[in-house]
């Protein structure tokens, strides 16, 4: 069913950027279609449990909606963070929710949800500091006695501070890349962090040391589009010579089947839109659009 969700979403959203190329670039327009997609996938005959060809109301409410839309919490992590941003789980990426419905204790990343074992270990040894603690007994909305601990951890190991003052003062520069198909790190979490940096320094001052790119098709180091680009040369010229990055650097796909097709890397919040003419495998046929 996970693969069916991905293929249905891809079919609905692929061409929203002007060309059906297996990459969803116009993510905002695609997310607007999520309610209709869920309605199409919803079980219509009162099915319960885990049917193979549709999603029950419980599955949509407890898993899909949370994974896609995220949620807020009634307290704050470090830097005022009160929300989990969600993923593009209804925009054509393959969700890593596991191969079976039954939860295994202790969890395993194959049969259970992706990263379930890491979450289990984190809660046991970082939060509860009890190897016998069960992940199923932990409620992020109401963590009780563990709230102070997770808030403290969010300040120790979190990466949500918008304060780059020391880095900026030393002449540091950042080429910041995030995949829109990443099932492990939410692109919206990174976008929110970037926006908090802009809120702190202003857009002009942020542009002096940061470029942020959301890359269609890029997952967590792999994906439908794996960009190879002159990032080191661009970064070196920016730091050593004061030459800012190109407006839209060209990236070449490293996947074997689509080797060397190219796309412009568009600075957030822009995305690559097909111009309507030209070779769909060439970056020159695309423009960065909002």
Image (cartoon, helix red, strand yellow):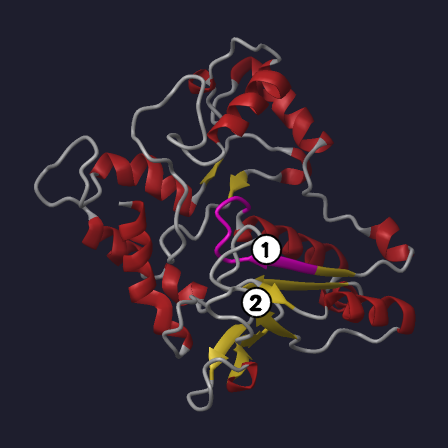
Is 12 displayed left or right of 169 in the figure? left
**Residue at (44% x, 69% y) in the render:** 26
Q: Is residue 177 magenta?
A: yes
Is 153 displayed left or right of 222 in the figure? right
Which stretch is magenta? Answer: 176-185
Q: Position of residue 190 (x, y in %)?
A: 60, 51
Outermost residue on the front side: it is: 256
Q: Position of residue 159 (x, y in %)?
A: 69, 41
Mark 1 crowd level (few <14, some 14–19, many ≥20, 10 Å Cα): some
Mark 2 crowd level (few <14, some 14–19, many ≥20, 10 Å Cα): few
Image: 245 above or below 255: below
First-in-chain label (1 vs 2): 1
Q: Is residue 248 magenta?
A: no
**Residue at (56% x, 22% y) in the render:** 121
Q: Which residue is mark 1?
A: 191
Q: Which residue is mark 2?
A: 269
**Residue at (47% x, 19% y) in the render:** 135
Principal SS element in the magenta part?
loop
Q: Nearer the viewer, residue 274 or 223?
A: 223
Quarter location, residue 205: bottom right
């Amino acid at each position: 069913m996970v693969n069916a969700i991905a293929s249905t979403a891809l079919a609905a959203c692929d061409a929203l950027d002007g060309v059906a190329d297996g990459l969803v670039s116009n993510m905002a327009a695609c997310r607007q279609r999520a309610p209709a997609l869920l309605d199409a996938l919803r079980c219509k005959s009162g099915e319960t449990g885990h049917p193979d060809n549709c999603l029950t109301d419980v599955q949509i409410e407890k898993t899909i909606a949370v994974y896609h839309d995220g949620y807020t919490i009634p307290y704050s992590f470090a830097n005022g963070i009160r929300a989990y941003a969600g993923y593009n789980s209804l925009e054509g990426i393959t969700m890593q929710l596991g191969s079976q419905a039954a939860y295994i204790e202790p969890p395993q990343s194959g049969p259970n949800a992706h990263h379930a074992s890491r979450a289990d270990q984190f809660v046991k040894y970082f939060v509860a500091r009890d190897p016998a603690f069960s992940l199923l007994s932990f409620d992020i909305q109401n963590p009780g006695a563990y709230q102070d601990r997770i808030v403290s951890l969010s300040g120790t190991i979190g990466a949500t501070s918008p304060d780059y003052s020391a880095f900026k003062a030393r002449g540091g520069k950042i080429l910041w890349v995030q995949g829109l198909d990443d099932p492990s790190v939410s692109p919206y979490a990174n976008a929110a962090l970037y926006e908090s940096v802009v809120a702190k320094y202003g857009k002009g001052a942020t542009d002096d040391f940061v470029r942020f790119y959301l890359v269609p098709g890029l997952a967590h180091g792999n994906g439908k589009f794996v960009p190879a680009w002159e990032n080191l040369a661009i970064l070196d010229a920016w730091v050593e010579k004061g030459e800012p990055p190109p407006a839209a650097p060209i990236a070449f796909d490293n996947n074997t089947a689509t080797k060397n097709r190219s796309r412009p890397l568009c600075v957030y919040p822009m995305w690559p839109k097909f111009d309507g003419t030209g070779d769909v495998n060439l970056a020159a046929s695309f423009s960065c659009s909002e």
